[in-house]
Image (cartoon, grey):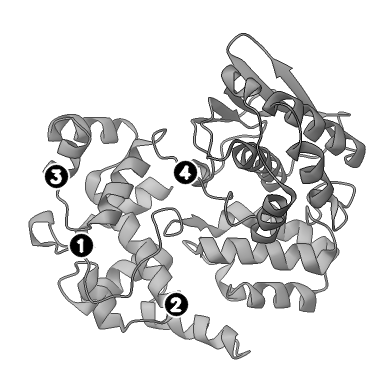
């Protein structure tokens, strides 16, 4: 869905030889924080929250996270990195459940702190992951975590305890993402992942998972699982109590989005464009050490286009600056390379279903308690 929306927006954008590098805007976040995800990604989380919270409490969580409630069900709506992090934090605090109703038993506030304490002094990542699974297996009723090691892989699986175990897509993704986040924290760097698989069908927002996980994603598998390279098992964690406090205080900001882009050509192209939006197809293909024709063919095989990826980045940067309210619409339009504000308005409406002016007004409204 993400690729098709971006590809169809080509008609609204300038041709590449007319695009200028962004200018006149405050500094953008890094390539990781500049990404957005579909509101559909959090559909299962919101369903869980509605079962735990009153409408008023959920409205407060959304408002405090900077999310316009009316946008949640609006086709094409996106969440920024800050909004997703804010939703996680506000929801966990409001419910007293660090997994926000995603599992059958609440995960009480403070559980993550003790999980981190259990793994931080482990003699190896393999032992740390074993401890991680054992603590979770004391907490979860509907699933258990299983760790297996083969010649070339170290794999953590979510195994249902019964045929009645529900399958919350956001819950599965968050558990695998937490696993990757803790392993990366213990290793002192974001570690590569061999593969990620989910036990549910491919959703319409499947493209968002490449922003969360540094690996190819499969669906309709027998179990949801994350697989690391076997050599990671012997790595010795080097973390202190003060490190743990910082990790917990910032969670999930440092680990919810991946900064590793080698697994997805779309993200590699996007990262190069984020540095300089004025780069052409020839510029980017040269930096990827391939011909323009080869890059176009590889993107076409994934149902993508160079211009579509550029428009996707434009959309995300536009959303970020509209949420920040740090630049005029004319400045955003010009910096993102549109020939005129009217062209930017049409493109933004196509991407999100609303004009940039309405989007900004709604974002400003929630900061003042006004519903638009």
Q: Is residue 5 above or below residue 284?
A: below
> Is 64 left, or right, of 267 in this rendering?
right
Helix, strand or loop at disc 3?
helix
Residue underneath mark 2? 324
* Quarter that holds the C terminus: bottom right
Decide if residue 372 is in sight here: no
Helix, strand or loop at disc 2?
helix
First reached walking from the N terminus: tag 4 or tag 3: 4
Tell me, for residue 13, which label it has, or none: 1
Residue 69 falls in image quadrant: bottom right
* Residue lying furthest top: 151
- x 17%, y 58%: residue: 278
* Residue lying furthest left: 17
Residue underneath mark 3? 283
Residue underneath mark 4? 207
First reached walking from the N terminus: tag 1 or tag 4: 1
Tell me, for residue 355, which label it has, or none: none
Q: What whole-number distance in Å separates the C-alpha atoms at marks 1 and 2?
A: 23 Å
- x 22%, y 78%: residue: 341
Local crowd at mark 2 within 10 Å, few (<14), some, or many (≥20)? few
Residue 350 location in percent, x, y? Answer: 35, 65
First reached walking from the N terminus: tag 1 or tag 2: 1
Residue 118 location in percent, x, y? Answer: 82, 39
Residue 267 falls in image quadrant: top left
Q: What whole-number distance in Å separates the C-alpha atoms at marks 2 and 3?
A: 30 Å
Local crowd at mark 3 within 10 Å, few (<14), some, or many (≥20)? some
Instruction: Tell us which disc is closer to us: 4 or 3.
Output: 3
> Is 98 left, or right, of 206 in this rendering?
right
First reached walking from the N terminus: tag 4 or tag 2: 4
Instruction: Tell us which disc is closer to us: 4 or 2.
Output: 2
Residue 326 falls in image quadrant: bottom left
């Amino acid at each position: 869905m993400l690729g098709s929306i971006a590809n169809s927006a080509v008609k609204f954008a300038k041709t590449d030889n007319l695009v200028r590098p962004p200018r006149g805007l405050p500094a953008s976040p890094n390539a990781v924080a500049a990404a957005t995800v579909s509101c559909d990604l959090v559909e299962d989380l919101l369903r869980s929250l509605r079962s735990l919270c009153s409408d008023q409490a959920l409205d407060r969580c959304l408002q405090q996270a900077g999310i316009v409630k009316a946008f949640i069900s609006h086709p094409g709506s996106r969440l920024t990195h800050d909004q997703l992090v804010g939703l996680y934090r506000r929801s966990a605090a409001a419910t007293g459940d660090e997994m926000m109703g995603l599992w059958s038993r609440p995960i009480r506030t403070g559980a993550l702190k003790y999980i981190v304490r259990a793994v931080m002094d482990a003699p190896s990542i393999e032992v740390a992951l074993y401890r991680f699974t054992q603590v979770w297996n004391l907490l979860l009723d509907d699933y258990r975590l299983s760790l297996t090691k083969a010649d070339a892989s170290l794999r953590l699986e979510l195994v249902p305890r019964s045929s009645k175990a529900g399958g919350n897509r956001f819950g599965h993704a968050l558990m695998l993402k937490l696993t990757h986040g803790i392993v990366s924290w213990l290793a002192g760097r974001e570690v590569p992942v061999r593969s990620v698989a989910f036990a549910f069908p491919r959703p319409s927002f499947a493209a968002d998972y490449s922003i969360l996980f540094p690996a190819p994603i499969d669906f309709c598998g027998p179990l949801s699982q994350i697989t690391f390279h076997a050599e990671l098992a012997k790595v010795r964690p080097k973390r202190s109590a003060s490190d743990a406090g910082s990790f917990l205080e910032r969670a999930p900001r440092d680990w919810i989005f991946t900064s590793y882009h080698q697994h997805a050509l779309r993200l590699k192209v996007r990262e190069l464009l984020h540095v300089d939006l004025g780069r052409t197809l020839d510029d980017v293909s040269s930096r990827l050490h391939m011909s323009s024709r080869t890059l176009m063919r590889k993107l076409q095989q994934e149902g993508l286009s160079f211009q579509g990826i550029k428009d996707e980045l434009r959309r995300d940067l536009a959303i970020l600056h509209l949420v920040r309210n740090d630049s005029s619409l004319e400045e955003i339009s010009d910096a993102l390379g549109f020939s005129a504000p009217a062209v930017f308005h049409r493109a933004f409406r196509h991407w999100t279903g609303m004009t940039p002016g309405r989007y900004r007004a709604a974002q400003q409204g929630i900061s003042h308690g006004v519903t638009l």
